[in-house]
Image (cartoon, helix red, strand yellow):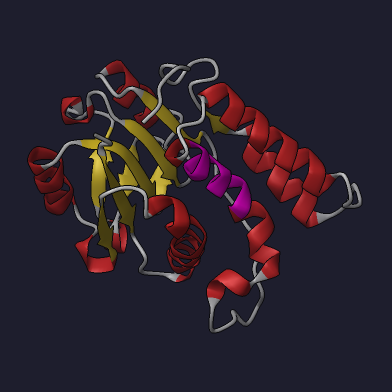
Amino acid sequence: MRPDILLIDAEWDTTTKYLYAFRRHFLQPDLNKYKKWELVGAKAVQPNVDQLLQAHRIGFISGAGHGFYHAFLGYLNSAIWEAEQDLTPLTGTIIHLLSCQTGATLGKSMVRQGAKAFWGYTQKFAFNRKAAPPADLHTDASAKQAIEMDLIIDMGILRRVSAVTIYHNVQDYVEAVTSGLPPSSLARAVIRDNFRHLVCPVPLWGDQSARL
């Protein structure tokens, strides 16, 4: 039997609303194969996360919100996890955090305390967007290039692809997208910088063989 999926989306300011819009639109076909729990907006706070972890067999946690080196933040920047706390409830879980910086300290602490694998970023994750956002945020082509790179991670995990293959798929995507952009392009710089700071089970943040 497949384990459950937990989605955490802070979804409270422009940045996190963009992330939620893309994740909701592009991940749905793969998510439909699983029993999933979603904590969005005001529900994306620490007590709700702990309750779900205690009540269900969660195999994969995918979160999108702001972050610091030591902490992942939910609604209104309330802390969901901090590196110094007891993170053993995450034992055996694959975790992917679309946020700034959490890969540097928090991700390492999660793996050290028992998480099966971690995907995230050691520095800021950035994306371009239109000055006047469209009504359907996921249609903003200027934001899609960077955010789609991260969506490859979720899609790979949900399709039970190996960490090595996922990483190579992300790498191939970055090369394909940026090869057609001028060296001075801001979009090129943003995507390459995001990829440069991506951390994952290849080779350090968890078990390379970890799959759902």
- Quadrant in which the C terminus is drawn: top left
Magenta segment includes 195: no
Q: Position of residue 124 (x, y in %)?
A: 55, 45
> What residue sits 8% from the left and 42% below the top?
55
Q: Position of residue 113 (x, y in %)?
A: 25, 19
> What residue sits 33% from the left and 44% below the top?
72
Count of numbered marks: 0
Q: Position of residue 70 (x, y in %)?
A: 35, 35
Does residue 128 appear in this view?
no
The residue nearer to you, when weighing 25 against 87, is 25
Look at the image and give the residue range highlighted in magenta.
148-156
Magenta segment includes 149: yes
Q: Quadrant of residue 81?
A: top left
> What residue sits 44% from the left and 68% below the top?
17
Asked if residue 210 is positioned above or below residue 46 in the image, the reply reads above
51 vs 168, left or right, is left
- Quadrant in which the N terminus is drawn: top left
Q: Position of residue 123 (x, y in %)?
A: 54, 38
